[in-house]
Image (cartoon, rainbow, N blue to C red):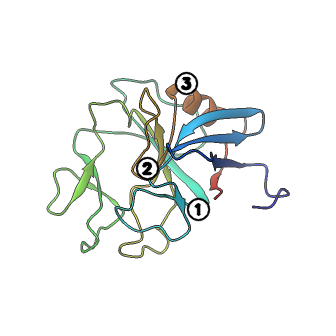
């Protein structure tokens, strides 16, 4: 990725270790992050556990109002409700879109007990256009306490995610380098 790109893009770089760890860099911020269990890939596929390489716009923020304060960010912000899901069924017309949960096809529930989705920034990966099987539900979300690898998302400590989203000029996109 070029060094002269827009300053409103945060960069995620993986480490040479194979533990799914990386660092997210944005202006003065350097946050440890978790990445996909299969590393990062240019040719992301549904279920491969990889974080997609590229530059992905931040579409909006979802949050659990029963657990955290609404993030103060210029991005669109929506509370997560118990019946919110995200379709990950490659055969379904709503693939890689928000859906009601439970859903008739395979869908990930956004109302989670493990706190990983207490705050979620939706990345614009495989959404315009959507390509069946390319990958779904790629988010910037809260990391597990041990920063274990994700299923393909990028995850930060809750405090770091809030700092990033509430920065005076928060990023407009996330770039994942190889």
- Residue at the far right: name it: 4
For marks 2 and 3, the one nearer the N-term is 2
Q: Position of residue 124 (x, y in %)?
A: 52, 60
Check whether the beta carbons of the residues at disc 2 and disc 1 lie within 8 A of each other: no
Q: Residue at x 77, y 38 (%)?
A: 27
Q: Secondary structure at mark 3?
A: helix
Check whether the beta carbons of the residues at disc 1 and disc 3 lie within 8 A of each other: no
Label 2 belongs to which residue? 37
Between circles 2 and 1, the one closer to the viewer is: 2
Tell me the CA gap for discs 2 and 1: 14 Å
Q: Residue at x 75, y 61 (%)?
A: 1
Q: Secondary structure at mark 2?
A: loop
Between circles 2 and 3, the one closer to the viewer is: 2
Label 3 belongs to which residue? 159
Residue 122 position (above or below residue 55): above
Residue 105 quadrant = bottom left
For marks 2 and 1, the one nearer the N-term is 2
Q: Residue at x 37, y 28 (%)?
A: 65
Q: Secondary structure at mark 1?
A: loop
Q: Position of residue 29 (x, y in %)?
A: 72, 33
Foreground residue, 20 or 169? Answer: 20
Residue 165 left/right relative to 130: right
Foreground residue, 155 or 39? Answer: 39
- Residue at the far front: name it: 17
């Amino acid at each position: 990725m070029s060094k002269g790109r827009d300053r409103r893009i945060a960069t995620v770089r993986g480490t040479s270790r194979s533990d799914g760890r990386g660092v997210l860099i944005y202006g003065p911020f350097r946050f440890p992050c978790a990445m996909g269990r299969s590393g990062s890939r240019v040719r992301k596929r549904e279920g491969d556990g990889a974080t997609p390489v590229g530059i992905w716009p931040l579409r909006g923020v979802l949050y659990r109002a029963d657990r955290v304060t609404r993030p103060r960010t210029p991005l669109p912000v929506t509370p997560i409700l118990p019946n919110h899901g995200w379709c990950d069924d490659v055969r379904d017309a709503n693939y890689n879109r928000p859906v009601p949960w439970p859903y008739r096809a395979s869908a990930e529930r956004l109302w989670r007990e493990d706190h990983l989705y207490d705050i979620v920034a939706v990345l614009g990966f495989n959404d315009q256009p959507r390509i069946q099987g390319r990958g779904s539900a790629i988010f910037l979300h809260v990391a597990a306490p041990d920063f274990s690898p994700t299923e393909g998302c990028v995850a930060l400590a809750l405090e770091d995610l809030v700092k990033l989203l509430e920065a005076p000029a928060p990023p407009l996109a996330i770039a994942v380098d190889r």
